[in-house]
Structure formats: structure tokens, C-alpha cells
Amino acid sequence: MRATAPGGAPAALRSDLPRDGESPERAAARLAARRGALIALPPIATMTLLFVIPLAIVAVYSFATRGRTGRTVLGDWNIAAYARLGEPLVLEVVGRSLGYAVLTTAICLVIGYPFAYWLTTRPMRVRAVMIVLVMLPFWSNLLVRTYAWRVLLASDGPIPAAFAALGLGELRLLFTPFAVVLGLVYGYLPFMVLPLYAALERLDLRLVEAARDLGASGWEAFRHVTWPLSRPGVVAGSVLVMVPTFGAYVTPELLGGSRTTLVGSFVVRQFLSARDWPFGSALSMAILLLMLVATVVYFRLQEDRA
Amino acid sequence: MSVLTTVRNARRTVRREPEGVQPRGRVARLLSLHGGATFLFLYLPIVVLVVLSFNDSRIVGVWGGATLRWYRELAGEPAIFTALRNSIVVALVSTVVATALGTAAALSLERFRWRGRRAFDGLLFLPVIIPDVTMAVMLLLLFVQLFDVAGALFGLRAGFGLGTITLSHIAFNVAFVAVVVRARLARLDPRLEEAAADLYAGPWRAFRHVTLPLIAPGVAGGALLALTLSLDDVVITSFVSGPGSTTLPVYVFGLIRRGVTPLINAVSVLMLAGSMLLVVISLTLQGRRGGGALRAAVPGRT
């Protein structure tokens, strides 16, 4: 923004005027810097109170000790909670969460990419309606959409009932890994489709046409033109699916069983039933770090390739 | 008509969307089949849930005829209405506050160069990628510590309730609003604001009459996202809610864990209808332009 300081500025605005020997450009930059920091002040204050300080408290708790009654003893500092992260059970839960997250993302990509591509080939009027139809679940309550699968998959629900009616025997779907991944894919598919659609819609089809004119087959044109150009959408969609599925709590709780415990439920258990806050805090820190590293590495890799 | 205009017009007709590159034949049929199946996958569970909510039978898999019985029984459940009221209060307050703060954050990051800008940028990225459970743990410990300090220093007795829930929702919503508004700001020509300044508009007037109207779809999109995230949240809310202060999703989550009942089917259908109504209303408010706010809040659209 330009600093326009009319001659008769009130005293309070005097500091906006160029200082002695200062070029107008520098004065403008100084003013802009001050104004930017001033505007940023309320959100910074809020984020400090509600994010930075809480994060620091969790970090402190992760080095504390669990008292015998479950109350956290602040003072007896140690790294016992972090040492427990290497326990087989913890590794199993974290590994399973990562596996489910990667699997869910891959399935969403395989379903979502051709779907988003198909949407861009629809006539404009139809497409507008279809996009709204994709957005509706995106904006709808995830808990309720997960609940719908609990109803469908329940042992007396429609799907097992249909199987039994067809003489295919008894089908146990609820509380299995299948149900959890299905629920996650269902829940997060719109998060993959919408960024993919945004990327594919912007794609300049003349580039594809040029590739075809130069003798590329349909597959070659896709492989060397469409796919690389749509990669920002792939990256955005993948991150949007992978991050929440890794820490998912509602879906595995409603559709999974004891053998499909994911890291989200595991952390919640440390706080609400096991009352081991230092261990839960150490776990939370580890999850945060893992997600941070994974996202940064993922973005970097994609930048390098582009 | 001059020769030049003719050439220009001819060019314009040539530069249409190329159609020769669209898939044809078997590939096109497969894509359409896949597209139809995906829509079926997205909507079939919802349709089944709606149908079952009118099922006059306690057993989910057995159709006992159509009834409005479950919806009528809902009216006799005061706990649901209390939870609904809590949800609405928390969502509205946290959305208004988070939208103001998030817009300020977006403006300061996108339009100004100041010391600490990069650090703040990085900080705002964290709530977006942080899993709900981690955020829940952080806020739980914050309030526990705050209550301890308040009690020890001032003898204040505070507890978990709607206040802590609202603050928590503000905590995770500011960053999401900022992301959405920033995407809009980035596409905006800064020269428009400079022109306003050159025409002697003060910073506030330039913002009020130039910037704000231009970023309004982004702000509305951010607010809608904040509202939706607030109305959806289960994990964080259940960590920071106190006795008698649950929100609707937390209450329903508790019911679902105990099992599937026709009553939950009815609540679920009403909740779905509520969020879809919200989307339809904002679409209508945006006019026929395909929902600027909705689209603005969809990630990946820069």
C-alpha cells in the first residue's frame, strides 16, 4: 500500500511521515510493515493463547510422570513416556494407522481421478449440477455419513440381509478392517475429488490436442501431458485425505473393532480411560511431528518433480 | 468491416475448446459407468438412511411400513434440543470470531511485509495438518492448567462448558478461514487497492470499499467452512465439554456407540438435511454463479 500523507496530518499520524533523510519508498515500506504487524496482532495473540501455549503445555506434560491415582505429577521429569513409544503395541497401532491412511488415499485417488476427469467432460449445465452433488457430501456431517454405513453393514442391516437372501451365507462386515477402510474412503472421497476437479478443469486442453497432433496415443498424451499438469490437484487431494484419515477417530470407533484400533482412539483412551496423560502427550507430540514431516516431505517431493 | 476485424473474428471462432481430445468409444463408456457408480456410492447410503428413518420397525433390516413415529418421538427428547441449541450457539459465536481473526491474518500475510511474517505463516499451517486428537489433547491440557492457575492465584472457580468449547472451535477455525481468504486475496490485483490509495482513500476506506467487497466470496466461504467444521466436530468438543454442555454431534456420537436405533436414524436424517439446507441457502444467496463461497472454500482452488 502507498503511504499518502497529506500535509496537515494530525499529530498521531506524524510518524507516518518520512523521517529525516529517509526515502519515500523506505518510509512507505516501514509504514506497511507496521500496519501489517498491527493487523496480524489479534490473530497472533489468539493463536498464541490457543495454540502455541497449549502445544508447549503438551510438550511439558510429555516429560512428566503419571501419579498412582492417575493424576499427572509435574516435577519428576523423565523421558519414560517417549521410551514407551517403542513398545510393540504402540508401533502396531501407529503402523496400522499409517497403512490405513495410505490405503485410503490410494483408493480415493483411483476412484476419484477418473471420476473428476469424467466430470470435466460433461456438458456445462449438467456439470454444474454434478459439482453441487459432489459438494453436498463434502459439506455434510461426517458423523452422520459414517453412521449410515453402520446401519448398512450391521448384521441385521440391508447388505448382510441381501447376501443371506441370495444364499451367499452369513456375512460379517461391521467391526472389520474392511468396514473401517470403506468408511474412511466414503468419508474423504469428496476431499480428493474436488481439488482434482479444480486442477483438471483448469487444464488447457489445447496442450493435449497438440500432443495428439504430434502423434501421441491417447494414453501417451494422458501420461505425459494431462497427468503431470494435474499433479497439484493430486498432491492437494492426497494431503487432504491422508492427514485426517491418519488421525481419524469417529470412523474407526463406529465401524471398527478392537483389532482395528487406530492411533486416534489410542490417544483418546490414554486421556479418558487409562488416565496416563504423560504417555498420551508424548503420543500426541509424535503424531504431530510425523504429520508435519510427512506433509513437508510430500510437498517438497512434488515441487522437485514439477 | 475492416479486414483486421474479420481476421480477429475468424480467430475467435477457431479458439474454441478442442473437442477432439475427449475420450471416445470404450474409454468414454467406461468413464461414464465409473462416474455413475461413484455417484451411487456417494448417495446410496444416504438414501437408505432416509428410507429407514421412516421404517415402522425396530429391526433395521425389516421393513414394517412407513411411519413418522420416530420423528414424533424425537420431539419428546429434550436432551437433543439442548444439545442442538448448544451446537448452534457455539457454531455461530466461534464462526464470527474465527472469520474476523482469520481474515485479518490472511490480509496481513498476503498484503504486507513485516518481521515475523514467515513464522506466523508457518504457525497458521499447523492447525490445518494437525490431527483432531492432538488438538483435543492440547486444548484439554491448556484449560486444566488455566483453571489451576486461576484457582490458585485468584480463587476463581471456572469449569469446562460452552465457553471452553467455543474457544476451542475458534482455535481450529482461524487457520482454515485464513487459508480460504488468502486464496482469494492471492488472485486479487493489488493495483486495485493502490488505485484507491492514490485516489486519497485512507487504509480503512480502501479496505471497506475495495478490498472487502472483492474478497467477500472468500470470507463467506471461510465462514461457511468454519461453521461446518464447528457443527461437525466430535473429538475436540468431547475433550473440552463439561457436564450438561454437550453439542449435538457429541450427544449423537454417544447414542450411536450404544447401537443403531430408529431414533438415531431420524436425528441423523435431520442433521443431514440441516447441513444440506445450509449449502443450498448459500448457493441461492450466491446467485446462479455456481456458489462462489462454496467453491472458494474448496481446497486446491487457487
Image (tube, coloured by chain):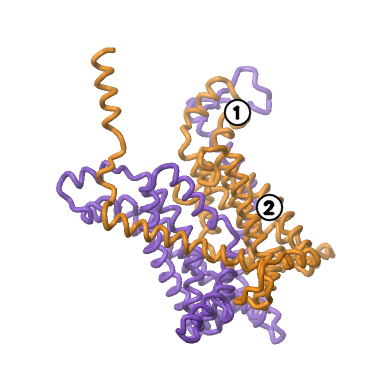
- Under circle 1, the secondary element is helix
- Report in which chain the residue with disc 1 lies: B
Residue corresponding to mark 2: B94
Q: Horizontal placement of A71 versus B198: left or right?
A: right
Residue corresponding to mark 1: B209
Same chain for marks 1 and 2?
yes
Image x and y of residue B14, in percent = 26, 31
Image x and y of residue A282, in percent = 56, 75
Q: Is residue A29 visible?
A: yes
Would you place residue B225 above or below residue A183 in this image? Answer: above
- How many tags in the picture? 2
Q: Horizontal placement of B238 versus A289: left or right?
A: right
Q: Nearer the viewer, residue A193 or A125?
A: A125
- Report in which chain the residue with disc 2 lies: B
- Whichever of labels 1 and 2 marks the residue nearer the N terminus, that label is 2
Which image quadrant: the N terminus of chain B? top left
Image x and y of residue A146, in percent = 57, 68
Q: Are circles 1 and 2 on residues that touch, CB within 8 Å?
A: no
Judge the density around disc 1: few (<14), some (14-19), many (≥20) Cα neighbours within 10 Å: few
Judge the density around disc 2: few (<14), some (14-19), many (≥20) Cα neighbours within 10 Å: many
Kindly give the residue lying farthest to the right in the view shown: B155
Chain A colour in the picture: purple
Residue type at mark 2? Answer: Ser
Q: CA distance from mark 1 to mark 2?
A: 26 Å
> Residue at 28% across / 33% down in the picture?
B15
> Residue at 65% across / 46% down in the picture?
A42
Q: Is residue B239 visible?
A: no
Which image quadrant: the C terminus of chain B? top left
Would you place residue A63 above or below residue B88 in this image? Answer: below
Residue type at mark 1? Answer: His
Q: Which chain is orange?
A: B
